[in-house]
Amino acid sequence: MRIAVYSGSFDPLHIGHQAIMEYLTRVRDFDWVYLVISPQNPLKSPEKALSAQKRYEEAIQAVRRHPDLHVWVDNIELAMPAPHYTVKTLDALKKREPDNDFTLVIGADNLNGIHKWRDAPRLLNEYGVAVYPRIGFDIEQIRKTLFEECRNIPAPYVLDSYSTRTMEGTVGFEDAPEFLYKIQIIDAPVVNISSTEIREAQDKGIDMSEFLM
């Protein structure tokens, strides 16, 4: 099956997240979306880790309100040791479900900063990403820049990446598969609301229920 891995804090899940998941399963023909609740983004404040179980339970309730969606709320990262690098999560999913094909779902803002991610070249080559629009980010240009970078990746990196996935040991570089970034752009709808804005409004006593999933 083709699985879209949509990872994040989802604090809380809102109609923007819902629109992306609907697009992935109804337009892009992914069989399922795995909504992976991340305890802690290594690039952000550590305080999120304290609410991970609560966010996981709330996400389950939100998804249950939309039984027509092919979405599975996955707690795989809750049992994994920190730091929670996305490539480690994808590796764990592939080990758990070797017959499935996994693609990471991210926004254009994350694609723009993906150099900061652990093993980003391997992630982009082995799993690939489906990228949805973000206001202020030119996805086409970001992808073009990354494709140019991919062509200039030193051969030893490609060889090391490949040889670690072989059972026979070290192989000659001429035997390694072509090293390519898999970056697909998805024309998912842009909903101009964020979880942070919702939380801040709720703290002021504003009813934001119309924006919640």
Image (cartoon, grey):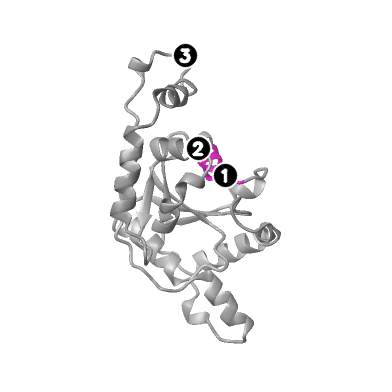
Residue 82 on image: x %, y %: 66, 45
Viewer-closest of 193 and 95: 193
Above or below 142: residue 10: below
Q: Which residues are magenta?
A: 84-93
Residue position marked by numbered label 1 in the rendering:
85
Under mark 3, the amino acid is Thr
- Secondary structure state at the residue bearing disc 2: loop
Quadrant position of residue 207: bottom right
Residue 93 visible (yes or no): yes
- Secondary structure state at the residue bearing disc 1: loop
- Secondary structure state at the residue bearing disc 3: loop
Residue drawn at x 43%, y 69% as measured from the top left: 16
The alpha-carbon separation of the residues under discs 1 and 3 comes to 26 Å
- Mark 3 nearby-residue class (10 Å; few <14, some 14–19, many ≥20): few
For the residues bearing labels 2 and 1, Cβ distance under 8 angstroms: yes
Under mark 2, the amino acid is Asp
Residue 133 on image: x %, y %: 35, 61
Viewer-closest of 14 and 1: 14
